[in-house]
Image: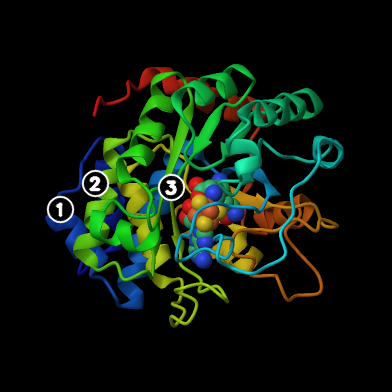
């Protein structure tokens, strides 16, 4: 569907996707098997066409607030797993409010409040609802929460307190691989939390990792698994080996697979939000991901911030270069620009148009 097609043919393919063409497993297999640069560039071209149809040159920006890096879990891929002997922090309410004040004057569409599964909040969820309320009060912005798995009652209270979006990544919908990544955690609980959140009016984000031993068939399972959730946002991130963790000695992979999967996600979820995370390769990496069909920039951090990311490509760099102004400058150089807050709010509202699929 890409090989031996000229650019006119690619334009027709993009139009077919816009008109509702659904990719078969055979199509996915064919696209995931592409390795020639020329073919990959053609795939990215089709994805950009599809994205531009729905979003023109407009991009959404999320700021990232990792407010507690304590965690009770032991995900094999994650730097913050409980067995890793690292420095951790948990921000107090004043620190959180201060961060919010710096965010207010930036062109940010949503604040992403992320934590490890920190018992301090998980065992006392009212502490987390207080954080959500405070962030809402300070910024007035839509709020994404990325707290890990929380029970239905807590998710409801968080929603009532101002949380609009739940990010909860399955990492893989291949159960065998899941068992090796999210060791000791229930596959169903994670799926069900997303599904419950969707049913009570949250927007939801699902995500997968690549470079974690996923072959083409496993990736297809994950792509189909994400479809079942009817997510509002879908992501793929390249696994980056982290020191001191079980998968820390694995050879790092390039971002080529991630870019390919971003482009395929755009063809499968034409009008959904797809992020280019700054956490993996900073602004140069953001440009590649947008060119592959992404339409959101995530993991934006104020320039003077000492907050952590989840992967932290810039952990050892002297200067961090992922603040809103640097992002916007690079977007403009690409002929893109931040969308309006109104455009983003419309996306948050359209969740009502798509019913959640019962499990
Ligand atoms: N603790 C919550 C949870 O696990 O759902 C919230 C944190 S979650 C946003 C952290 C996400 O970052 C993971 O779901 C995973 O997709 C990604 N991540 C973590 N470690 C990573 C690594 N080493 N390389 C790539 N992505 C990673
Ligand atoms: C990112 N560090 O977008 C963030 C994180 C959590 N909702 C998002 C993985 O890269
Ligand atoms: Fe904890 Fe989330 Fe890292 Fe897993 S991915 S160890 S749940 S912070």
Q: For this view, does 235 lie left or right of residue 341? A: left
Question: Which sits in the foreground, 16 or 70?
Answer: 70
Reply above or below: 90 against 97: below
Say which residue label 3 marks.
Answer: 169
Return the mark for residue 25: 1
Residue 290 is at least partly visible in this image: no
Q: Which picture quadrant has residue 28?
A: bottom left
Q: Residue at x 64, y 22 (%)?
A: 162
Reply above or below: 208 against 139: below
**Tally of numbered discs:** 3
Q: Which residue is drawn at 61% across and 61% down?
A: 279
Residue 42 is at least partly visible in this image: yes
Distance between the Cα atoms at labels 1 and 2? Answer: 9 Å
Residue 203 x/y as whole percent: 47, 29
Residue density around tag 3, few if under 14, some if 14–19, many if 20 or more, within 10 Å: many
Q: Residue at x 69, y 70 (%)?
A: 314
Say which residue label 2 marks.
Answer: 224
In this view, the mark in front (3 or 1): 3
Residue density around tag 1, few if under 14, some if 14–19, many if 20 or more, within 10 Å: some
Q: Which picture quadrant has residue 69?
A: bottom right
In this view, the mark in front (1 or 2): 2
Of labels 3 and 2, earlier in sequence is 3
Question: Which sits in the foreground, 24 or 248?
Answer: 248
Callouts 1 and 2 close, C-beta under 8 Å:
yes
Of labels 1 and 2, earlier in sequence is 1
Distance between the Cα atoms at labels 3 and 2? Answer: 14 Å
């Amino acid at each position: 569907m890409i090989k031996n097609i000229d650019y006119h043919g690619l334009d027709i393919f993009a139009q077919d996707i816009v008109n509702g063409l659904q990719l078969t497993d055979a199509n996915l297999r064919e696209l995931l098997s592409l390795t020639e640069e020329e073919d990959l560039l053609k795939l990215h071209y089709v994805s950009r066409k599809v994205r531009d149809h729905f979003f023109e040159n407009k991009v959404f920006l999320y700021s990232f607030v990792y407010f507690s890096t304590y965690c009770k879990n032991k995900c094999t891929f994650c730097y913050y797993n409980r067995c890793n002997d690292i420095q951790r922090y948990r921000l107090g309410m004043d620190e959180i409010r201060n961060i919010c004040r710096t965010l207010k004057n930036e062109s940010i569409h949503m604040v992403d409040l992320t934590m490890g599964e920190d018992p301090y909040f998980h065992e006392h969820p009212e502490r987390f609802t207080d954080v959500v309320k405070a962030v809402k009060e300070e910024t007035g912005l839509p709020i994404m929460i990325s707290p890990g798995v929380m029970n239905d009652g807590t998710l409801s209270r968080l929603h009532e307190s101002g949380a609009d979006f739940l990010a909860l990544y399955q990492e893989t919908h291949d159960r065998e691989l899941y068992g090796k990544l999210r060791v000791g955690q229930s596959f169903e609980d994670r799926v069900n939390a997303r599904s419950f959140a969707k049913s009570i009016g949250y927007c939801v984000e699902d995500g997968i990792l690549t470079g974690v031993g996923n072959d083409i068939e496993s990736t297809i399972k994950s792509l189909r698994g994400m479809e079942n959730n009817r997510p509002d946002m879908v992501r793929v991130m390249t696994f980056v080996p982290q020191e001191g963790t079980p998968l820390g000695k694995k050879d790092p992979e390039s971002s080529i697979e991630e870019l390919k999967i971003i482009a395929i996600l755009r063809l499968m979820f034409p009008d959904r939000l797809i992020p280019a995370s700054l956490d993996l390769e900073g602004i140069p990496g953001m440009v590649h991901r947008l060119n592959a069909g992404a339409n959101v920039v995530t993991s934006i951090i104020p320039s003077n911030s000492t907050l952590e990311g989840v992967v932290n490509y810039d952990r050892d760099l002297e200067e961090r270069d992922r603040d809103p102004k640097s992002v916007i400058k690079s977007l403009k150089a690409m002929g893109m620009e931040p969308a309006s807050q109104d455009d983003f709010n419309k996306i948050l509202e359209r969740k009502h148009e798509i019913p959640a699929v019962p499990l």
